[in-house]
Amino acid sequence: MWFQLFMLVVSLVISAVTAPKAATPKPASLSDFDFPQSTEGTAEAVVFGDVWIEDWFVTGVGNFRKFDVKTKGGK
């Protein structure tokens, strides 16, 4: 029994030491996204509600955060 517990602890330590370290990804920037853009002079359709339209484009992108979201812990 003690030998098995000892082997479990040894294998956990060896696994933790030899595990590859994960590289931290770089944060996304606006240049990473490919937004469809309209050409100048194209008429803009105003749609109210949920519909399917074949011809669409992004007229503006907003609320892109530059800072980390900091929250306090739960109760």
Image (cartoon, rainbow, N blue to C red):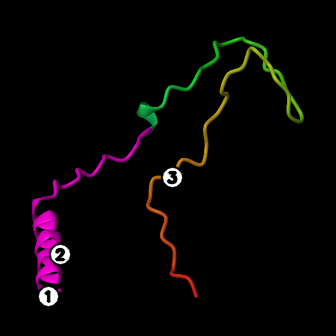
What residue is disc 1 on?
2
Q: In the rendered image of this protein, does residue 9 appear above or below residue 24?
A: below
What's under tag 2, amino acid-wise?
Leu
Q: Tell me: residue 47, above or below residue 56.
A: below
| Disc 3: CA contacts within 10 A as few (<14), some (14-19) or many (>=20) | few
Q: Which mark is residue 73?
A: none
Q: Which residues are magenta?
A: 1-29
- Front-lying residue, 46 or 23: 23
Q: The residue tagged with tag 3: helix, strand or loop?
A: loop
Question: Toward the viewer: 50 or 46?
Answer: 50
Badge 1 or badge 2: first in the primary sequence: 1
Q: Quadrant of the N terminus?
A: bottom left
Q: Residue at x 86, y 29 (%)?
A: 47
Circle nearer the viewer, 1 or 2: 1
Amino acid marked by disc 1 = Trp
Residue 10: percent from left, percent from top: 10, 74
Return the x and y of residue 72 as percentages of the image width and height.
Answer: 51, 79
Q: CA distance from mark 3 to mark 1?
A: 54 Å
Q: Nearer the viewer, mark 3 or mark 1?
A: 1
Q: Which part of the image, by quadrant, shows the C terminus?
A: bottom right
The verdict on residue 56 being magenta is no
Residue matched to label 3: 65
- In the rendered structure, does residue 9 fall within the stretch colored magenta? yes
* 2 or 3: mark nearer the eye: 2
Residue 8 marker:
2
* CB-based contact (under 8 Å), mark 1 and mark 2: no
Q: Secondary structure under badge 2?
A: helix
Q: Is residue 58 left or right of residue 4?
A: right
